[in-house]
Image (cartoon, rainbow, N blue to C red):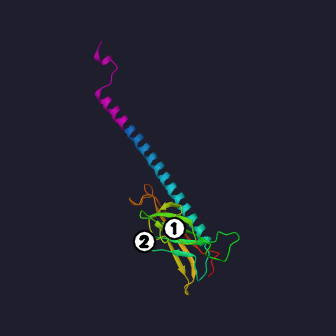
Amino acid sequence: MSIRAQNALTLTELLVSTILMGIVMTGVAAFSLFVKQARDSTGSGTILAVQTATAMHYLVADANKAVGDSGDRGIITSSASTGGICFRYDNNNPPTAIYADDIWSCYYVGSSYGLHKCGPTSPVPPTNGSQCNSPRIKLVELADRNYFKVVDDADGRFQYVDITLNTIADRGRPADTIANPTYQLFTRISPPAHGR
């Protein structure tokens, strides 16, 4: 029997088939990596979006319940380093005209830029987050400590509160649409039960 009559692969055919298999395997691995990254980024982006919307919901709900007047605002802010704002609201049914029995709900930015909800607290609001003796809940990680602005009119009377939540998934990494998403929510609140 001659050598040419046998069915066998030559070295060239073996090399070509190995290269083609490598190309196919590289394509499959790249596609798999893309799908994993897309799934991971969608997950972190969705979680951040829900956390940001939830934090804004809490802030808006408490700000809308704020009671006060030109002599006693019912909205207290602390220094920019603690990023604190407190809203006083009447929890009595029916509401009373006495502020001394009202309760406070406060928001503070921690050292790691986490926005914390503190309250409802007693009739005396804490002056910073460490004095909060009621349940304290971390709502979301902020990209910026300055998340609110209390605006007065020309006569110094309270007008409204602007709240801007700039959030980021991981403050330690640069913002990126896929790998490290950011969100921004803005609202302007003028509490209806607040006397001007």
- Using the image, determine if residue 142 lies above or below residue 29: below
- Using the image, determine if residue 153 lies above or below residue 180: below
Indicate whether residue 33 is drawn in magenta: no
CA neighbours of label 2 inside 10 A, class few (<14), some (14 to 19), many (20+) = few
- Amino acid type, label 1: Tyr
In x, y percent, where is residue 145? 45, 69
Q: Name the residue nearer the viewer: 71 or 64.
A: 71
Q: Residue at x 41, y 64 (%)?
A: 111
In x, y percent, where is residue 43? 49, 51
Q: Residue at x 55, y 65 (%)?
A: 119
Q: Judge left or right: residue 188 versus residue 12.
A: right
- Amino acid type, label 2: Ser
Residue on which disc 1 sits = 107
Report the span colored magenta.
Answer: 1-22
As drawn, the residue found furthest toward the bottom would be 155
Indicate whether residue 7 is drawn in magenta: yes
- Using the image, determine if residue 85 lies above or below residue 3: below
Mark positioned earlier in the residue sequence (1 or 2): 2
CA neighbours of label 1 inside 10 A, class few (<14), some (14 to 19), many (20+) = many
Q: Name the residue nearer the viewer: 39 or 15.
A: 39
Residue on which disc 2 sits = 81
Quarter of image, res 22: top left
